[in-house]
């Protein structure tokens, strides 16, 4: 057990300002003073504070020393590690207590957020209905059942301006009204929890953190449209969410909040869980309904729309998890309160799952109209390792990329569509200079090609052909004609596919072509991948100036592609090289570069 | 089957349990147990806290799990709210750290400063990655 830990930043920024020399000097000094067994020296990854580097932090005190020099080391060891006094001269903040933040609520990450759908997430115990009740749980249902007529509920939702959070952005109130209209012996309420976009986990988090708010909202929807039966269609890959939903349903039944004669008002509603096997297309509403009916998960042509002929041919209301999570708050706080949040055409808040090259990976909820810049820098904490921000991918395989130059765009349904992306369900993947946009487009097309259900030809065959062209480009065999072919194919697939999956599948290609055409051209004309991702276009080269001719690379190469003699010169034989990158990681002098 | 009055009764009786403000009577310890938390190792943390609370025979301490707090990269997250005090968020917890928090903070009333967030220039620096030579 060490009594003290010294962290030295080993990120690129601090290393180039000499942090490794500091580490060496520190280790020597500790040995000289005979305390090297008591103090542990740790080289860390980048703290993201490169401008203050080289950075040294000493725990348990958490003293943060910036711009440390080799000459400072004897004094630092003497004062801090031996005498236990903080070396004021080098400490970045005068007082250490100042940088200690006791609650997450005080952090910038939370200050720009507004939690509506996620109100209870991370606060209540999701497996205890009493805790949900304590924060006004089931009060909205009580209000609706005892004081409101179904039409009044619908008009409140319409007035709030809430739009579908699953991605399409269809006005929720209108959908409820359309489903309420038809007369039928049975109607259904469905919750779409088949969250399939790579990188998205908002719905999972809501169901794991606050399952009761979705149940309550589905009951309210049932009352409004005249349905007595609900289904939650959720992926089997979400075992914790499924478990907590089942617990919530059982507890609600026990309290008489689900089932017959709810709250003694005579209203009847029951909810069943249906597990999806994880096909992406089952998030499409008509395919989802087929799946619930026990059929193969393939879309049906629209019209008829689910509002008229959905599950088993009956009028069906289908909304996404996050849409439902807003309902109870609208009922309790009023439509005007909700309509005051956000922009003119996009009301309320939106939950995003932040992922990719961003410091604060996690779940954020922001008022509509917040700019991308605020999300990435103020909430997300910026791009790690001092890399340059390149783009954000929103909307998953149906969405597109927003380039760095549009970073000040407000996030709402219409702005995102106007620049060729879409809100999508809320996955937000941040890309930096090390991401190749052609490769990103290829990734999504590869995903879509696998997930296409095969019912209609444009999607089944077209996405495969688009993928082949993209693969050809990433191998450096593309031609400029291919770009036109991609655009033609994209247009045709969009126009003629049966469902939303095919109709939006070309979006990642179209938006990257629109904003990053020069990267495509670099692959085709110069046979180069500017981000250094596409393997076929890379060459590993040895920088003769940095190379110390030790031969370690040649010995490590699994295919003996590095030729040369120790103390003379080494070169990479490009014909033999399989581009595995082993030489680059092995070289102690960073003399090998990929271009 | 509960009546509207009975539900209201439950709401009233449970409010102190979940109250996030200082005016509560009991101490609440919550552990982030969404997929992100569990993947980061929250389950052993929760078990250690429950074990420690039982071992010390602590009364008026509620241990609860909760959903995603939002900063998945700092999980496992443990939050402690003591009566009359502001909420304290501990990040990157382990079972050992959690036992220390129960002993020093929940019992002793002293916040374990080392485990709260350390923020310099807007960046949280507790979650450093160790690089191997």
Image (cartoon, rainbow, N blue to C red):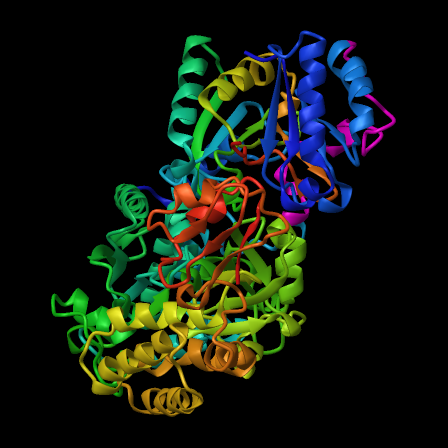
Q: In this rendered view, identify the residue nearer to me: A123 or A581.
A: A581
Q: Is residue A207 visible?
A: yes
Rendered view: A496 above or below A518? below
Q: Is residue A439 left or right of residue A179?
A: right
The percent position of residue A254, horizontal first and vertical second, equals 26, 41
Q: In this rendered view, identify the residue nearer to me: A203 or A356.
A: A356
Q: Is residue A346 left or right of residue A583?
A: right
Rendered view: A381 above or below A47? below
- The magenta stretch spans which residues? A83-110
Name the outermost residue toward the left: A295
Q: Is residue A150 visible?
A: no
Residue A368 highlighted magenta (yes or no): no
Q: How many marks?
A: 0
From the image, give the main secondary structure of the stretch colored magenta: loop
Q: Quadrant of residue A507?
A: bottom left
Q: Residue at x 66, y 31 (%)?
A: A8
Q: Quadrant of residue B6?
A: top left
């Amino acid at each position: 057990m060490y009594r003290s830990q010294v962290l030295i930043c080993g990120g690129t920024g601090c290393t180039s300002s000499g942090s490794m020399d500091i580490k060496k000097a520190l280790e020597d000094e500790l040995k000289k003073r005979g305390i090297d067994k008591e103090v542990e020296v740790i080289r860390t990854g980048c703290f993201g504070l490169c401008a203050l580097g080289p950075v040294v932090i000493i725990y348990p005190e958490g003293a943060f020393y910036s711009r440390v020099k080799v000459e400072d080391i004897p004094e630092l060891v003497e004062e801090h590690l031996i005498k236990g006094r903080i070396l004021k001269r080098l400490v970045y903040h005068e007082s250490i207590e100042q940088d200690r933040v006791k609650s997450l609520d005080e952090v910038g990450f939370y200050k720009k957020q507004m939690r509506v759908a996620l109100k209870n997430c991370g606060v209540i115990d999701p497996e205890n209905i009493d805790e949900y009740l304590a924060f006004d749980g089931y009060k909205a249902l009580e209000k609706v059942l005892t004081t409101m007529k179904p039409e009044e509920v619908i008009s409140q939702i319409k007035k709030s301006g809430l739009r579908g959070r699953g991605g399409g952005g269809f006005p929720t109130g209108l959908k409820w009204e359309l489903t309420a209209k038809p007369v039928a012996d049975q109607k259904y309420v469905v919750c779409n929890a088949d969250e399939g976009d790579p990188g998205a986990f908002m719905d999972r988090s809501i169901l794991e953190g606050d399952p009761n708010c979705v149940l309550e909202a589905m009951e309210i929807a049932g009352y409004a449209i005249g349905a007595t039966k609900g289904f939650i269609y959720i992926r089997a890959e979400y075992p914790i969410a499924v478990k907590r939903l089942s617990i919530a349903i059982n507890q609600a039944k026990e309290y008489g909040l689900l089932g017959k004669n709810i709250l003694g008002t005579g209203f009847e509603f029951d909810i069943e869980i249906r597990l999806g096997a994880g096909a992406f297309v089952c998030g499409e509403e008509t395919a989802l309904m087929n799946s619930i009916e026990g059929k193969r998960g393939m879309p049906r042509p629209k019209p008829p729309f689910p509002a008229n002929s959905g599950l088993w041919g009956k009028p069906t209301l289908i909304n996404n998890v996050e849409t439902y999570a807003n309902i109870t708050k609208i009922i309790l706080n009023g439509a005007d309160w909700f309509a005051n949040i956000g922009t003119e055409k996009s009301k309320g808040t939106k939950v995003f799952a932040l992922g990719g090259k961003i410091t604060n990976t996690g779940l954020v909820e922001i008022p509509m109209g917040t700019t991308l810049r605020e999300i990435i820098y103020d909430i997300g904490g910026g791009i790690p390792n001092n890399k340059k921000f390149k783009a954000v991918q929103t909307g998953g395989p149906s969405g597109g990329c927003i380039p760095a130059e549009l970073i000040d765009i407000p996030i709402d349904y219409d702005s995102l569509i106007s620049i060729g992306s879409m809100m999508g369900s809320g996955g937000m993947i941040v890309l930096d200079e090390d991401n190749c946009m052609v490769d990103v487009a290829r990734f999504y097309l590869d995903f879509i090609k696998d997930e296409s259900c095969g019912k209609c030809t444009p999607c089944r065959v077209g996405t495969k052909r688009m993928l082949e062209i993209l693969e050809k480009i990433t191998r450096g065999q593309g031609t400029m004609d291919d770009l036109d072919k991609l655009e033609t194919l994209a247009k045709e697939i969009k126009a003629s596919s049966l469902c939303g999956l095919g109709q939006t599948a070309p979006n990642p290609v179209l938006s990257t072509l629109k904003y990053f055409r020069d990267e495509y051209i670099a692959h085709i004309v110069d046979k180069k991948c500017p981000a250094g991702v596409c393997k076929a276009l890379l060459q590993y080269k040895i920088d003769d100036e940095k190379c110390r001719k030790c031969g370690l690379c040649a010995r490590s190469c699994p295919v003996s592609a590095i030729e040369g003699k120790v103390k003379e010169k080494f070169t990479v034989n490009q014909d033999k090289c399989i581009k595995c990158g082993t030489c680059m990681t092995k070289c102690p002098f960073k003399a090998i570069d990929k271009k | 089957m509960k009546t509207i009055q009975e539900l209201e009764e439950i709401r009233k009786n449970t409010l102190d349990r979940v109250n996030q403000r200082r005016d509560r009577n009991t101490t609440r310890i919550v552990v982030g147990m969404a997929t992100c938390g569990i993947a980061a190792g929250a389950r052993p943390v929760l078990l250690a806290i429950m074990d420690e609370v039982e071992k010390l025979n602590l009364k008026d301490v509620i241990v609860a799990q909760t959903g995603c707090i939002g900063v998945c990269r700092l999980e496992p997250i443990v939050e402690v709210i003591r009566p009359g005090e502001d909420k304290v968020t501990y990040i990157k917890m382990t079972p050992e750290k959690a036992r220390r928090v129960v002993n020093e903070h929940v019992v002793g009333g002293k916040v374990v400063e080392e485990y709260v967030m350390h923020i310099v220039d807007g960046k949280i620096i507790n979650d450093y990655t160790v690089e191997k030579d």
